[in-house]
Image (cartoon, rainbow, N blue to C red):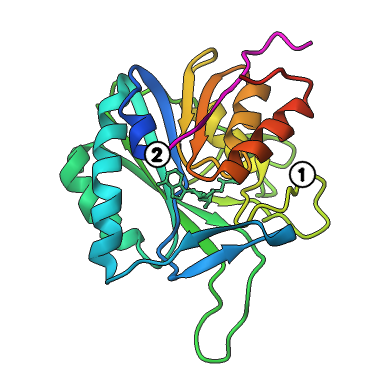
Amino acid sequence: MSQAPTPRVVHADALDLARTLSDVDLVYLDPPFFTGRTQTGRDERAFADAWSGDINAYLAWLDPLLVALRDSLAPTGSIYVHLDWHAVHYVKVRMDELFGYDHFLNEVVWLYGLGGSSKRRWPRKHDTLLWYAREAGRHWFEAARIPASSRRLAGQLKKAPDWWDIPALNNMAHERTGWPTQKPLALLDRIVRSSAPPGGLVVDPCCGSGTTAVAAHAAGRRSIVGDVSAEAVALTRERLRGLELSVP
Ligand SMILES: C[S@@+](CC[C@H](N)C(=O)[O-])C[C@H]1O[C@@H](n2cnc3c(N)ncnc32)[C@H](O)[C@@H]1O
């Protein structure tokens, strides 16, 4: 059995869960992206991302969740909100209002490579993560190091920049669970290790297949993750049991 803390997996609406939390070191929020369709994965696993009305219906759902998550953070805590072109610009403006413009830390661009091509526009091959601190300057951060690409620094490590070239999961990937829009462990590993202290508390209230819980466990961080979908919760628990964890 591992010594790392066992994640807690909760079947709950994100807002209800967020309102029970305090002193959180890191929130990773990967909500529906406002794509306007049902996201479907393998074995008919799916979650709804359709909104009656325009972007305002989506923001009306997200706003109170962002407020509750902000209030759950420790003074040294921070939050990543993972989105794409559908809503990220609207949410940036909202988060500036809710967190304060001065507490914005980075817009991290995740370059994932896979995805459709188009003859009519540039192929969309990235997501955007908005990173805000509860109190910029007091937030915990330890920059990730990646292999330097320049010839001069060959063989050395350098601090990762604000764009991350991490492959998306392909259909053959070992870690693939079949949950739609599952994120790669390498992405969550970087977020968790760089932005939550060892032993700190990581929260993911829209956990899907539980990637954050797996990454937090491997990195020696505590975690509380939840999802409104009973299927996602069952899948997350199953995935964690695969690591020989007895999951509450
Ligand atoms: C983009 S997916 C998360 C994928 C996840 N990061 C992974 O690696 O598998 C979004 C998740 O949000 C969940 N969700 C949607 N509305 C929710 C709500 N109100 N409360 C909690 N979870 C919600 C969906 O069931 C879905 O699993």
- Is residue 10 highlighted in magenta? yes
Q: Find the magenta span and give its range.
A: 1-13
Instruction: Tell which of 137 and 60 is nearer to you.
Output: 60
Q: CA distance from mark 1 to mark 2?
A: 25 Å
Which structural element holds mark 1?
Answer: loop
Residue 146: image quadrant is top right
Decide: marks 1, 2 in contact (CB < 8 A)? no
Q: Of the residues tagged 1 and 2, which is closer to the observer?
A: 2
Is 22 above or below relative to 143? Answer: above
- Which residue type does callout 2 highlight? Ala
Q: Percent x, y for residue 243?
A: 77, 25
Instruction: Tell which of 146 and 135 is nearer to you.
Output: 135
Q: Percent x, y for residue 222?
A: 54, 18
Seen at 27% across and 71% down, the residue is 54
Seen at 63% across and 31% down, the residue is 215
Q: Is residue 181 left or right of residue 225?
A: right
Q: Which residue does the numbered mark 1 point to in the structure image?
A: 175
Is 13 above or below relative to 180? Answer: above
Within 10 Å of the Cα at label 1, are there few (<14), some (14-19), or many (20+) other Cα atoms? Answer: some
Q: Percent x, y for residue 64?
A: 24, 43
Residue 6: image quadrant is top right
- Which residue type does callout 1 highlight? Glu
| Lower sequence index among marks 1 and 2 | 2
User: What type of secondary structure mainly makes up the magenta span?
Assistant: loop
- Is residue 148 highlighted in magenta? no
Q: Which mark is residue 14?
A: 2
Q: Is residue 50 visible from the viewing direction of this image?
A: yes
Is 197 above or below relative to 195? Answer: above
Q: Is mark 2 within 8 Å of ligand 1?
A: yes
